[in-house]
Image: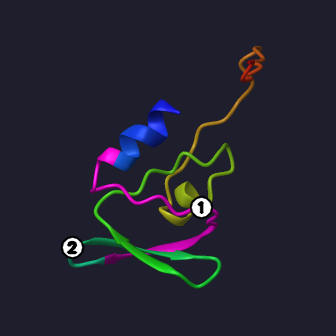
Amino acid sequence: GVLNAAIARDGRIRVEIPAAFARAEPVAHGLRVHLADGRRLDTRLLVGADGAASPVRVDAQIGVDGGEYGQSALVCHVE
């Protein structure tokens, strides 16, 4: 799709699929991300867009205010 084409054109982006986050540690130039399979990645930016029970957020010790908001959503891709 469009996103994959844009990523392919940009030499600064590396996609690691499949991958499961284990932990991150600060290093001099940013973060060292440890994946569950033992791989390590060094990065200056880590985005934790991994759901409500985000392992990235928990590892970074970022709290969350939870609660009910009385709404539901359905997200799907239809061709």
Q: Nearer the viewer, residue 29 or 68?
A: 29
| Residue type of the residue flagged with mark 1 | Ile
Q: Is 11 in the magenta?
A: yes
Local secondary structure at mark 1? loop
Q: Quadrant of residue 68?
A: top right
Mark 1 lies on residue = 17
Local secondary structure at mark 2? loop
Residue at 53 percent of width and 81 percent of height: 39
Q: Nearer the viewer, residue 39 or 49?
A: 39
Q: How far apart in space, not on screen, are marks 1 and 2 (Cα)?
A: 24 Å
| Residue type of the residue flagged with mark 2 | His
Residue at 21 percent of width and 73 percent of height: 29
Residue farthest to the left, as pictured? 29
Q: Is residue 13 left or right of residue 15?
A: left
Work out whether mark 1 precedes mark 2 in sequence or the reverse, and give the earlier one. 1
Highlighted range, magenta: 9-26
- Residue 12 position (above or below residue 71): below
- Residue 27 position (above or below residue 14): below
Residue at 39 percent of width and 46 percent of height: 7
Q: Is residue 59 left or right of residue 44?
A: right
Mark 2 lies on residue = 29
